[in-house]
Image (cartoon, rainbow, N blue to C red):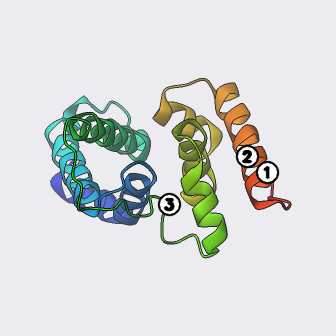
Amino acid sequence: MTKDQFTVQILDMEKTLYRVACGILRSEADREDAVQECILKAWEKRSALKNDGAFRSWVTRILINECYDICRRGQKLVVMDELPEQAAPPELENRELRDAVDQLEDIYRLPILLFYVEGFNIREVAQILQIPEGTVKSRLYAGRGKLRESLGEEVPE
């Protein structure tokens, strides 16, 4: 993959990377750090990518790993004067829905964000999260159920 190809694809993914980081991290600074580290690691390891068609999934997986690394490092620090920000992506227009998605556990929130907000298909979500496709489907189903409970209304399939 050439420098220009890498740059074009990363720029196309910029909003996606940020929204995925929003789904995991509470702090704006942590989100920005995760995206920057993800891009740097993807650039450094771009030769390890065997299939250019899997670039989006590969970079998203790097980002998720980086977000979890930041979470692990952050557990050692307690900042009392900083309140957590909304973790759900700001692109979800319905405030109530955004809050409900934000309250979901990671195992449900991430598949829902990747599938419904970012438009990854079931196979890509499975690759990104490193879980079987059946597990993705069951987590989407369960996540929708939890959203129905918290919203008290019908959530689109």
Identify the element where label 3 is drawn.
Answer: loop
Identify the element where label 2 is drawn.
Answer: helix
**Residue to which mark 2 is pinned:** 146
Quadrant of res 71: top left
Q: Disc 1 marks which amino acid?
A: Glu
In the picture provided, is 148 more to the left or to the right than 25?
right
Q: Which residue is rendered at x = 60% and y = 76% of the image?
A: 93
In the picture provided, is 23 more to the left or to the right than 36?
right
* Mark nearer the N terminus (2 vs 3): 3
Crowding near the residue tagged with mark 1, few <14, some 14–19, many ≥20 C-alpha atoms within 10 Å: few
Position above or below: 142 against 91: above
Position above or below: 127 against 116: above
**Any part of residue 102 in sight:** yes
- In the current view of this chain or complex, which residue is farthest to the top? 132
Q: Disc 3 marks which amino acid?
A: Ala
Quarter holding the N terminus is top left
Real-space Cα separation, disc 2 to disc 3, in angstroms: 16 Å
Real-space Cα separation, disc 3 to disc 1, in angstroms: 18 Å
Q: Are the residues tagged 2 and 1 within 8 Å (C-beta)?
A: yes
In the picture provided, is 44 more to the left or to the right than 53?
left
Identify the element where label 1 is drawn.
Answer: helix
Q: Disc 2 marks which amino acid?
A: Lys
Residue 59 placement (x, y as % from top left)? 34, 44
Q: Are the residues tagged 3 and 1 within 8 Å (C-beta)?
A: no
Residue 96 placement (x, y as % from top left)? 65, 69
Instruction: Please name whichever residue, 9 or 13, is drawn nearer the observer in this view of the structure.
Output: 13
Crowding near the residue tagged with mark 2, few <14, some 14–19, many ≥20 C-alpha atoms within 10 Å: some
**Residue to which mark 1 is pinned:** 149
**Residue to which mark 3 is pinned:** 88
Residue 147 placement (x, y as % from top left)? 72, 52
